Amino acid sequence: MSGTMSRADLVADLKASLHDAAEVFTAAGGADFARLLDLAALDFARPRPRTLIGSVLLAAGTADYALPDDFHAYKTDLWIDPARAGKPWEKHYAGPAPRIAVAFIDGVQRLIFFPAPTWEQIAAWGSAFRYYYFARHLIGEAAAQTTLDAGDRGLLLLRAQAEAMRELAMRNIGKPVALRDGLNSAPRNGTPAALYQALLDEFRVAA
């Protein structure tokens, strides 16, 4: 498995690594394998956090703002400067800093200010709200567009293999299968679930 971090190379190597189990994933153009890789990449947010800077243009009285497409979790702001807010008895006092959070509005995550920023705060700290956020890892069509390091290629494939076993275990729930294989007492449809846990454990130790 000496391919690149491009989506096509990763799909090819994941398919090869699954051997006969790959026959279950039949979506055109390797879409099933691409989906498994995308799901695997999401799990790298914990062992390989990716911090980026986001920015929105604030408007007085507006409380919610759009987030980047790769947003995973909010970290901290680069906007609020208590030293420039003034004191409560001073004429230019900007008021207490708003609390900042992320919430779903109509099914979409938005950046929320409680309360909405005021003219005084925008005058004190600027209209450009810049902040650190944790970004999701992405797999690109070209290797250079994949956010994971090439050194984590094996780990990515391992995590995708685990995801494949999870789906195989779920698939077997509704299918009539022989509970014993005649050679030992292990139930056949428990094998993917056991492999899922073993692969997941291996990933977490290695990551």
Image: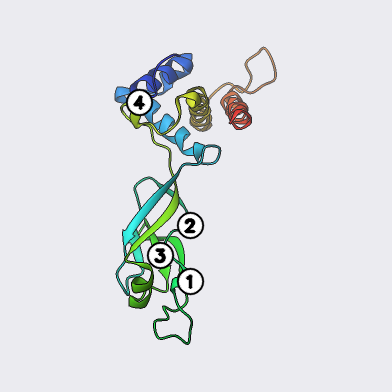
Tell me the distance, in whole angstroms, between the alpha carbons under discs 1 and 4: 45 Å
Q: Position of residue 113 (x, y in %)?
A: 41, 68
Q: Position of residue 62 (x, y in %)?
A: 32, 71
Mark 1 lies on residue = 83
Tell me the distance, in whole angstroms, between the alpha carbons under discs 1 and 3: 23 Å
Tell me the distance, in whole angstroms, between the alpha carbons under discs 1 and 2: 17 Å
Q: Residue at x 44, y 20 (%)?
A: 14
- Whichever of labels 4 and 2 marks the residue nearer the N terminus, that label is 2
Of the two numbered discs 1 and 3 in the rendering, the one whose residue sits closer to the viewer? 1
- Whichever of labels 3 and 4 marks the residue nearer the N terminus, that label is 3
Tell me the distance, in whole angstroms, between the alpha carbons under discs 4 and 2: 30 Å
Density class for disc 2 (Cα within 10 Å; few <14, some 14-19, many ≥20) is some
- Whichever of labels 1 and 2 marks the residue nearer the N terminus, that label is 2
Of the two numbered discs 3 and 4 in the rendering, the one whose residue sits closer to the viewer? 4
Q: Which mark is residue 143?
A: 4
In which quadrant is the N terminus drawn?
A: top left
The kind of residue tagged 3 is Ile
Of the two numbered discs 4 and 2 in the rendering, the one whose residue sits closer to the viewer? 2
Asked if disc 4 and disc 2 are in contact, CB closer than 8 Å, the reply is: no
The kind of residue tagged 1 is Ala
Mark 2 lies on residue = 76
